[in-house]
Image (tube, rainbow, N blue to C red):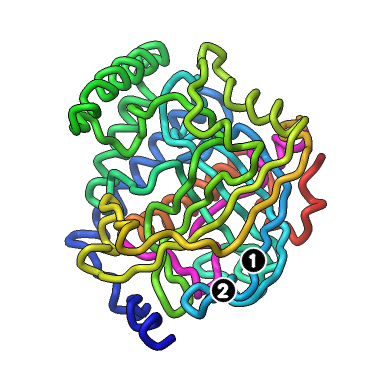
Amino acid sequence: MSNQLEQYVRYSDNVEVKQPDEDRLIYETLNSVARMGQKVFDKHRHAMRGAHAKGHGGLKGELKIYDNLPTPLAQGLFREPKTYPVMIRFSSTPGDIMPDGMSSFRGMAIKVIGVEGPKLFSAQPDALTQDFLMINSPVFPAGNVARYLNEQLLQEKVVVSAPEEAQQFLTTALRTVNAVTEKMGIDLYPTALGITLPETHILGETYYTTAALRYGDYIAKLNAVPISASLQPLIGQTIETHDPSVLRNLIVEFFRQQAAEYELRAQLCRNLETMPIEDASIQWSEQDSPYQAIAKITIPVQEAYSPARRVYVDEVLSFNAWHCIAEHRPLGSIQRVRMQVYEASSRYRHEMNQQPKVEPRSLEEMPD
């Protein structure tokens, strides 16, 4: 057992390294997010999330932590076998409501209910919830705070200001070019906006935290992998995107008839040089450190987008990776800038829409 423990990097406060000019870069990012939020509000007369504005469904489920996990995996929330209620929101990453034909990363935000202990940098530190935020990419192309600012300025300029038709045409063209160049081992247009991604079924995706987080005594990245027989046919399944709300429709139709299971897995850090904390654009080698199963998420048959549920999930709930217990503190400059961006965006949205900011204490608080 001692050899197994020694092969993983131990968490300490010095694994993070503040980036050059980080405070200014975060300040400029916050200003861009505020400008974009105001533009989106003026467009819709309604405030949206600064990222992941378009929700495609809200779901109730449970997270069951596996029994007999080895010590490096039995950490923090996962230290003992237990079953927690969860609320899940599927989304797309832009900070505006765009047609689903415009490619972007998809998001899977998980709110675990019944987690005791103070929460870091949260407006409600005594809440009984813990958030995990994931997208369908193992890396975050804007891997540090400087590149994040550049991508944010691009999103402010292109996603908000350009006509929707032009944006959709751009993503279609870039997807076509990338599909050709990837066969040659070339990725011409890597971007944090995800605009070159192929259009595939949202429920068949594997979702990743992309950036590192503290995992108790260790450091890890997490992912959620579709494992049920109902989800297997959806993995990599291409879809038509003529309907601007096709992703919502796919989720609603699926969960009206079928249940789903995702497996939550952890990839533990072995080497800070090859598995860096401060650059989330570098993929950690799964050969050196494979993702290991830690829990299962089960989502039963339900109505995923009723009017009452949509309002609750899209308007009332907030998700922030920093709404967490200390054992799962987000790590790296991407996480540090997101801490402030997500909180500012949530505060603006709730104030402008006059909605309460609620951390649920029971699964029953999500309407059917």
Q: Mark 2 or 1, which is nearer the eye? A: 2
Classify mark 2: helix, strand or loop: loop
**Mark 2 and mark 1: Cα distance apart in space:** 9 Å
Query: Residue 288 lies in what quarter of the image?
Result: bottom left
Classify mark 1: helix, strand or loop: strand
Q: Is the Cβ of the residue at disc 2 closer than 8 Å to that at disc 1?
A: yes
What residue sits 63% from the left and 25% below the top?
250
* Residue 35 place in picture, x, y as percent: 38, 36
Q: Residue 199 versus residue 226: which sits nearer the camera? A: 226
With respect to residue 297, does 330 lie above or below?
below
* Residue 29 place in picture, x, y as percent: 32, 47
With respect to residue 62, does 314 lie above or below?
above
Q: In this view, does 327 lie to the left or right of 282?
A: right
What residue sits 64% from the left and 44% below the top?
228
Residue 69 badge: 2
Q: Find the magenta span and give its range.
A: 308-332
Q: In which quarter of the image is the C terminus?
A: top right
Q: Is residue 117 left or right of residue 43?
A: right
Q: Quadrant of the N terminus?
A: bottom left
* Residue 243 place in picture, x, y as percent: 56, 14
Is residue 319 highlighted in magenta?
yes
With respect to residue 175, does 316 lie above or below?
below
State whether residue 37 appears in this view.
Answer: no
Q: What residue type is labelled 2?
A: Leu
Q: Check disc 1 and report the residue beneath it.
A: 65
